[in-house]
Image (spheres, rainbow, N blue to C red):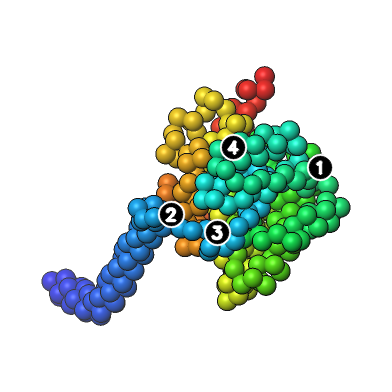
Amino acid sequence: MAAVDSFYLLYREIARSCNCYMEALALVGAWYTARKSITVICDFYSLVRLHFIPRLGSRPDLIKQYGRWAVVSGATDGIGKAYAEELASHGLNIILISQEEEKLQAVAKHIADTYRVETVVMVADFSRGREIYAPIREALRDRDIGILVNDVGAFYPYPQYFTQLHENTLWDIVNVNIAAASLMVHIVLPGMVERKKGAIVTVSSGSCCKPTPQLAAFSASKAYLDHFSRALQYEYASKGIFVQSLIPFYVTTSVTAPGSFLHRCPWLAPSPRVYAQHAVSTLGISKRTTGYWSHSIQFLFAQYMPEWLWVWGANLLNRSLRKEALSCQA
């Protein structure tokens, strides 16, 4: 009986001594929960403020805000083409840069006829390296360039492991994804600084959020573009220049397999035109954005999920996309 009483007294003493620690842990838990709840509420408010409220008001005057001409690289397909058309719908004259002259001429004619703006085409293969930039610099020298959109990019034929990539693909990723954006900014930025206004939009990718297996070189190059844009914003915001890192997730394009789940989920992967309409509405508002409401939700999940979960999901998705691509080639 004495042993039972002793054990009970010992238990009460331990419980009493631990009580303060339990209270402290409860306070920490309550603080953490409150902090996360506030963060989620702020993220939801930012999503509404960025992607829905601007579309309720009148369209901004981009010519007055930035300038009369916009330069769009990679303008013959996908986001680049749609972004050029959306800027033209605001009245901006468009300079289209890509390597396929026939497509360029067709897109330029469509934009000029549809939106009654001036268009200029420049044929340039960014994969050839530094030799192409002197003619571009000369052609843009005396123009009032208000907006630069860096959309030209090199991608894998389909998700692959690094050793399966051809060496030419790696060089294209370096020359097109990294060098092209850097040098195009270097060409147009001095004029913008002189005029004390302008906007630079660099299209990165949702794969830059975390290391993305089977897209290793591509996702690393897009991470460079994201950091490059954010650093430029800090350098030149005080000089009247707005620099935006645009981080889209999946968008349906002409190379997307017709029967793929991306075509079956337009809310998850919008068309380039729908994406561009939303993305242009964020210009001047957010220096780092996905450009589309459902992509912002995906971005939030990517930010909060552990890296191992991102890698698992990326492997699963990329295996599926590789299988679809190979089945289309068969």
Q: Residue at x 75, y 46 (%)?
A: 122
Cα distance between the residues tagged 2 and 4: 22 Å
Cα distance between the residues tagged 1 and 2: 45 Å
- Asked if the residues shown at circle 2 and circle 4 are in contact, with their CB atoms under 8 angstroms apart, the answer is no
3 or 4: tag closer to the N-terminus = 3
* Residue type, mark 2 in image: Arg
User: Which residue is denoted by mark 1 in the rendering?
Assistant: 167
**Where in the figure is residue 36, as x and y percent of width and height?**
35, 64
Number of the front mark, 2 or 4: 4
User: Which residue is denoted by mark 2 in the rendering?
Assistant: 59
- Asked if the residues shown at circle 3 and circle 1 are in contact, with their CB atoms under 8 angstroms apart, the answer is no
Cα distance between the residues tagged 3 and 4: 19 Å
4 or 1: tag closer to the N-terminus = 4
User: Which residue is denoted by mark 3 in the rendering?
Assistant: 63
Picture disc at residue 113: 4
2 or 4: tag closer to the N-terminus = 2
Circle 4: element type: helix
* Residue type, mark 4 in image: Asp
Picture disc at residue 282: none
